[in-house]
Amino acid sequence: MPSRERSKRVEAIVLRHSDWGEADRMLWLFTRELGKVQAIAKGVRKSRSRKAGHLEPFTRVELLLAHGRDLLIVTQAEAKEAYLSLREDLLRVGYASYVIELLDRFTYEEGENITLYRLLSDTLSRLNSEPQPAFAVRYYEVRLLDLVGFRPQLFNCANCGEQIQPEDQFFSFEKGGVICPGCGVNGTGLRPVSMPALKILRHFQRSRYSEAQRARLSSIIDQELEDLMGYYLTYLLERGLNSPSFLRRVRNGAPPGNK
């Protein structure tokens, strides 16, 4: 935000927050106008604060941001979408946490990115309403990789360049794409990928969401893609993610706080 602007109104999604001082809260925001930024919400932890309920993680909110000495300061906040249905379902909360964590890990404070903001906002809306939330998450993973510069090669062998044939393949994290059986037979560090799973990835990569919804995502293929993309995303980030363990505990029926 240019220093000559004393304040700016933005639309944002709250990624996460942490306590700051005695009554304030540090916010990590992904905004439509500025990209990812940090801001301080002063006094928000006081019982009388009117901003507190508007600044929870994965809330879409309209903010007025002012320049402080070192950080932006939230002077006004109005929630535009709290995704209430999502918050009532622990599994959807887990998926939302995963979506937020991926975007947070892959982005820096590098300015406006409206396309990425729309993907995040649309995905949270889908998680709030879709009967099969996993479908929205698998689509999000593929589109996010496109937007952050890690589009996987899915139509030609990432090793020899030959067109992929309709049969089970391998996937190379190092090469960032599919490896044909001929190249993969003696390869190392490869994971198998079935042709049905590869078809879903290809369909998502080249389709808008309304078109992608024509595909059927079975629970078996969903699990295969979740495992594959989980390993690939961890490889790209060079560190593990926190939210998948929460998702596993929810699915297994364990209290989310338990290890």
Image (cartoon, helix red, strand yellow):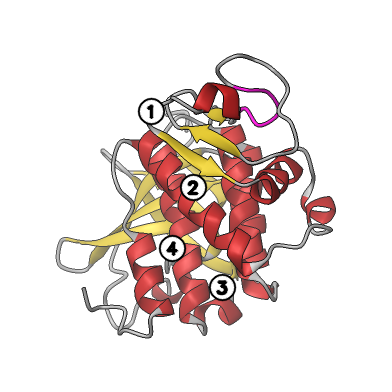
Front tag of 3 and 1: 1
> Over which residues does the magenta segment extend?
153-157
Q: Residues within 10 Å of mark 1 (few under 14, many from 20)?
A: few
- Going by the numbered disc 2, the residue's amino acid type is Leu
| Residue tagged 3 | 82
Q: Is residue 188 above or below residue 12?
A: above
- Residue 228 is labelled as 2
Which residue is located at x 47 percent, y 33 percent? 1
Residue at image point 31% right, 78% down: 256
Residue sitting nearer the eye, 209 or 43: 209
Residue at x 37% of width, y 42% of height: 234
Mark 4 residue element: helix
Element assignment for label 3: loop
Check disc 4 and report the residue beneath it: 97
Q: Name the residue nearer the viewer: 93 or 46.
A: 93
Whole-percent x, y for residue 110 in the image: 45, 29
Q: What is the secondary structure assignment of the residue under circle 1?
A: loop
Tell us which disc is closer to us: 2 or 4. Answer: 2
User: Of marks 1 and 2, which one's residue comes earlier in the chain?
Assistant: 1
Q: Give the spatial CA distance, label 3 vs label 4.
A: 14 Å
Q: Are marks 1 and 2 in contact (CB under 8 Å)?
A: no
- Viewed as shown, does residue 22 lie left or right of 169? left
For label 2, count other residues whose C-alpha is less than 10 Å away and answer few (under 14), some (14-19) or many (20+): some
First-in-chain label (1 vs 4) = 4
Percent coordinates x, y for residue 230 in the rendering: 44, 49
Which residue is denoted by mark 1 in the rendering? 188
